Structures are given as C-alpha cells and as structure tokens.
Amino acid sequence: MSKTAFSPANILLPRECGLTKWAVVACDQYTSQPEYWERVDKYVGDAPSTLRLILPESKLESDNVDQEIQKINHTMEQYLADGRLQELEDAMLLLERKLSNGKTRLGLLGKLDLEQYSYEKGSGTPIRATEGTVLSRIPPRMKVRRNAPIELPHIMVLIDDPQKEIIEPLATDKAKKEMSGVYMTSLMERGGRIAAHLLSKKQAEKVEDQLTALGDPQRFAETYHAEGKPVLVYAMGDGNHSLATAKACWEELKPTLSPEEQLTHPARYALVELVNLYDDSLEFEAIHRVLFGVDPKKLMADFLAAYPGAHYGEGEGHQITYVLPGGEKGVVTVPNPTAQLEVGTLQTFLDKYLEENGGKIDYIHGEDVVESLVSQPDSIGFLLPSMTKDQLFPTVIFDGALPRKTFSMGEAHDKRFYMEARKIK
C-alpha cells in the first residue's frame, strides 16, 4: 500500500495514431454548444480517438444514451484487443501543458485511492470535494462507467504547496535528465500543446514522501491553525462529479469482492492529474450572481434582516456590492460573518430567498456582463471579489466546502484533454 492517497499507476497510452486527433477535451465542457462537438466529430473522422471512448455530457439526457454507452464500451474493448493502447506499468508522469495564453501548467499523473475520498458534505477524508456535489448528477454517469473496461480522466486535483517544492522542481532540465519522454503533441481547438515525461522510480518515491509529509497531522494543524480537524491533503479542482462517480461505482462493487480483492482491485482507484494550487497558470476568476424575477427592494430588505447588524455602506466584515436596475451600485456590509468567504455569506441567503420567494439565478463571468444583464426592473446583480489561493484550503477545512460557483479554473479550451487511460476491470 502507498504511504499517501496518490501513487504511480498502470497507465495506458495510445500507439500508432495521430495524437492531435486522439486527444479531446473534458466531456463536461461546451454542454450548450453542440456545434463544438459536431466540429470535433468531423475533424476526427475515422481516426482512432478518445472521442469514441467518452460521452459528451450534452448527450447524457438523450433518448439513445444506452446505445451510445454500449458503443463506447465496445470501442474500448476493440482498442484493447487491437493493441491500440499500450500499458506503462507502475508509472508517474510529469505533464507540461502549454496553454493558449502562453502559460504552462504542470501536473503529475497517477492514481488516487478512492477509499480516502468522500464527496459527502462535511466529510473528513484526506481527499475532499471543494464544492457541493450534486447527487442527482452521479447515477447517469455511473451508467457510463459501470461496464467500461477502462477509465479516461479529466480530473484535476489540487495540492497546497505555496513554496513549490513538489511538482515544480521536476520540470527543471536537471530533473528531466532522469526521465524518459513519453509523448508530445499539439491539441485541437485552441488546446495548446502537451508533453509527458516518465519519472524515475527514485523521483516518484520522493513525490510520495513529500505528499505524505503534507498529510502529517502536526504540520497540518500548525499550517492551518486547525487543531483537532481531520487532515486535508487533496482538494478537487476539476472533475469532482467524475471522481464522485468512480467512488459510487467502487462502493457498489466492493461488497462483491473478498477483503483481499478489495485491497488491490483496479476500480478502487481513479487516474487523476495532480496540480499545485500555486501553479502560475492557475488563475481564479470571480463568478458573480444575477437574479431575475425578483423584487430588488424586498430582496435587499430581507438580506439586511437575515444578518444581525448588516448595514448599507462599507465597514468591518464581508462587503458585498449590489447592482440595481438602471446601473445604481452600492455596498452592504455583514459584520462578524460565520462563512470564510463573501460568496458563502451571500449564497446562503440567496438559496433560502429563492426557495421561499421564487426567481432565477445565473452565474456570470465579468462585471460588465452583470451590469448589462441588470436592465430589467425585476433583476438585481451582486459582484463578488475573486477568491485568493490561500483561502481555498482553509475554507474547505472550516466551512466543509465552497458554495456553488465560487471560482473558475480557467477557460474551457484549457481544461484537461483525454490522452491516457487505465484498466478498471
């Protein structure tokens, strides 16, 4: 057993095919832009591609979803039988992703132990969701995974390493001399470029030791002033519902296995990319709120009433900017907030208000977009500050999870592309 939840994996890699057509973006992107997936389908044509091994989420609700899933599973079996995928045993890969904006995102590819993860609210496992998991989103995804012989990950998991001591040193020329190159390719649809390098056994062991040290209870308590709180080492960045689906499938399978089988069964793990929260390419963008079909005056009165001492104007505590129809802006201050972040204070109130009074909420990037949307008399907008990186782990530790739509980890075309796979049967 590994010392920490993240360890080397048996990684399947494509062989004898064009990698630009092989790799496609995470299936949960472009859900309301079917033309994107149509364009990708046309570009890929008959070439071997992960497009034939995944189900874009825009198709999850379609009438013929069961046939689509059967077709995917058949293609997986076919690729395995044809030798299209070759296995790299006990491997940890360094990934260098050159993004469309010119920045490079570094990651480590390996497997996570699902026994050390829970998506339940308030869980104290070393691997945790950063945002609330929508349980209704899991069963449709379980259908895709349940009979699949392999998994393809778009999961990115964050570690909190502000000194950049774990992943970043591996990207130096000196460190790469100990590695062997695995692949290098450009990615379709403004995806940039990606290269992978195989870590030496010694390098992979050092990573595991460093990650184990991150999970030391004394270090954890001192770093986060979190005496008595359960240790958090791995926080979900992207793909939380994919990891939750892998966990749900594992829990379903577990009772059918002997205790010995449970220790080593491949479905106990999920292939993920580990990324440092402090990676230079990761930029947290604020996500603002706009409400429609509400009475702005009543909503603001109820907001002030919901928090003792809340008042118009700036002051000590959480300051939240509101935008009224016609462009009028102001600030409300909530003193002595119980949530770590302004978005937590606001979202708790909005959820309750919408449940009791009706209305619709939308989550918006860009202050200018908020201002242009708040033009109807029955609308109101709220502008939120960007979350800083040093707030992420403390918020998950003390609040349990971030409110929905707290931050975004970059643009759709910069998300993970499917390249590697792993057997789960």
Image: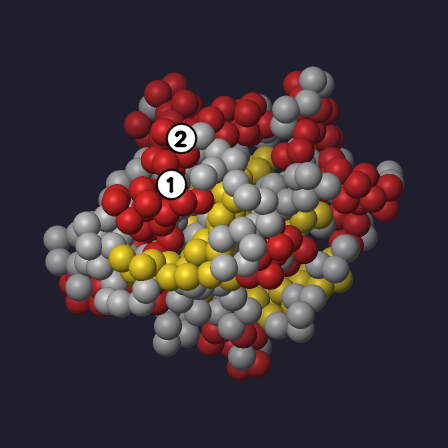
**Which amino acid lies under the numbered mark 2 shown in the image of this protein?**
Asn
Q: Is residue 166 left or right of residue 42?
A: left
Q: Which residue is mark 1?
A: 298
> Which label number is shown at residue 357?
2
Query: Which numbered disc flags the more N-terminal residue, 2 or 1?
Result: 1
Q: Position of residue 334 (x, y in %)?
A: 26, 57
Q: Position of residue 270 (x, y in %)?
A: 47, 42
Dot 1 surroundings within 10 Å: few (below 14), some, or many (20 or more)?
A: few
Q: Measuring 41% from the left and 61% from the top, which residue is drawn there? A: 330
Disc 2 + disc 1, Cβ < 8 Å = yes
Instruction: Specify whether residue 399 is in view.
Output: no
User: Which amino acid lies under the numbered mark 1 shown in the image of this protein?
Assistant: Lys
Image coords of residue 80 (percent x, y)? 68, 35
Q: CA distance from mark 2 to mark 1?
A: 10 Å
* Residue depicted at 31% across the width and 67% down the height: 314
Q: Residue at x 68, y 44 (%)?
A: 30
